[in-house]
Amino acid sequence: MTVIVGRRRIGKTKLIKEAYKEKVYLFVSKKNETFLCAEFVDIIEATLEIKVFGEFKINKSILRGRIC
């Protein structure tokens, strides 16, 4: 896992997207955890072309790779 922090509008997102073109990029925003987890599952399925079974209920479950 890579975490990048820094000032606003200096190109962090562009740097990540360019460096990890063929990897999964999950942006953590200030959303309800349920919606955020659902969005993560959609991104993982589309990027890796796999089907995710089960349901993620908290962010920690995704970060640890466990399905609740």
Image: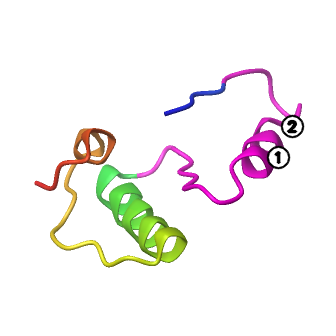
Q: Disc 1 vs disc 2: Cβ atoms closer than 8 Å?
A: yes
Where, by quadrant of the figure, is residue 61 drawn? top left
Q: Which mark is residue 57?
A: none
Up the image or down, 34 lies above or below 7; here it is below
Instruction: Return the x and y of residue 50 as percentages of the image width and height.
Output: 38, 76
Residue to which mark 2 is pinned:
11
Instruction: Return the x and y of residue 28 as percentages of the image width and height.
Output: 51, 44
Up the image or down, 16 lies above or below 26; here it is above
The residue under the point 45% across, 51% down is 31
Magenta region: which residues? 5-31
Q: Amino acid at mark 2?
A: Gly
Q: Amino acid at mark 1?
A: Lys
| Main SS of residues in magenta | loop
- 20 or 11, nearer to the observer: 20
Residue to which mark 1 is pinned:
14
- 9 or 21, nearer to the observer: 21
